[in-house]
Image (tube, rainbow, N blue to C red):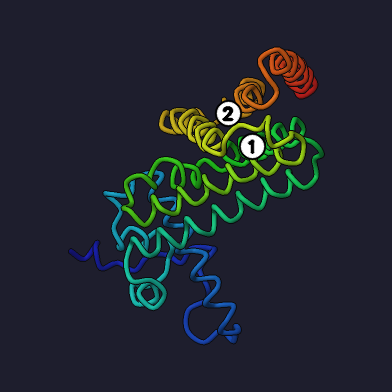
Amino acid sequence: MAENKKKRAREPYQLPAGRHGLPRQFVVTNQRQRILAAVADVCSSSGYVAMSVEDIVVTSGVSRRTFYDNYRGKEDAFLAAYDEVSAQLLARVQEAYDAADGLVDRARECLRALLEFIASEPTFADMCIVEVLAAGPQAIARRNTIMSAMASLIDQAAAGELPKTKRPAPIIAETLVGGIYEVIYSRALAGRYAELPGLLPDLVFALLQPYVGSEIAQEILKKERRRLARAESASA
């Protein structure tokens, strides 16, 4: 019993106890960031269903009162964490889209940004790709919004290059995004994040085939596989 009451050592990321003279807004932002990072950590290690407010409080190093000053419960904290990470992901993809020119380059660079972000942030990816499905209807609705935004980028890129009579219906982009999500989900579920960047050539092929046709998509696939092989050789 005495062991349970023993005061925990202060972690390096925790603010000084008592009066510290730090601006109130800095303190609030720091606490929220720690809470949201803790949500991702606990989701990744234990899963959303098993996660408790106590787990978040202990992992973040904030008090229970501080947690409830910011969030109504674990679902509210999860949604806030999901919104923050998904906003970062969309910003990366949008940046890649804006920097590229043409349907083929935009498809490749957006997919590259997506795969590299997820591969580099496995804890956040566990939360946003896997555990989101267990977090309730509001979380799933947010996931669907992100997927719709991705599909809209595909339609936008196609509209800038293909005449209306030759463009697939918008549901094709939705279907493609859903398929890519499932590919990523299966790897994330197995913890195989390192494999994701290597899937780029085949996913580019799958994404572009309905828009450019099988023959051109095959040529793009060969080119992307050569590009990936050169990149892997250079980094070896």
The residue sitting at 45% across, 31% down in the picture is 182
Residue 135: give x, y in percent of width and height: 33, 51
Q: Do labels 1 and 2 touch, CB within 8 Å?
A: yes
Q: Residue furthest front?
A: 165
User: Residue 226 — which label?
Assistant: none
* Within-10-Å neighbours for mark 2: few <14, some 14–19, many 20+: many
Residue 10: give x, y in percent of width and height: 46, 67
**Dot 2 lies on which element?**
helix
Q: Which image quadrant is residue 139 in?
A: bottom left
Quadrant into which the N terminus falls: bottom left
Q: Which image quadrant is residue 54 in?
A: bottom left
Residue 195: give x, y in percent of width and height: 57, 25
Q: Is residue 73 above or below residue 146?
A: below
Q: What amino acid is at disc 1? A: Glu
The residue sitting at 44% across, 57% down in the picture is 38
Question: As rendered, which of 107 and 139 lies closer to the eye?
Answer: 107
User: Residue 116 — which label?
Assistant: 1
Q: What amino acid is at disc 2? A: Leu
Question: As rendered, which of 226 and 160 lies closer to the eye?
Answer: 160
Quadrant into which the C terminus falls: top right
User: Residue 196 — which label?
Assistant: 2
Indicate left or right for 79 with 75 as reference: right
* Within-10-Å neighbours for mark 1: few <14, some 14–19, many 20+: some
Q: Is residue 197 above or below residue 127?
A: above
Residues at marks 1 and 2, CA–CA distance in whole angstroms: 7 Å
**Dot 1 lies on which element?**
helix
Indicate left or right for 140 with 165 as reference: left
Residue 77: give x, y in percent of width and height: 40, 63
| First reached walking from the N terminus: tag 1 or tag 2 | 1
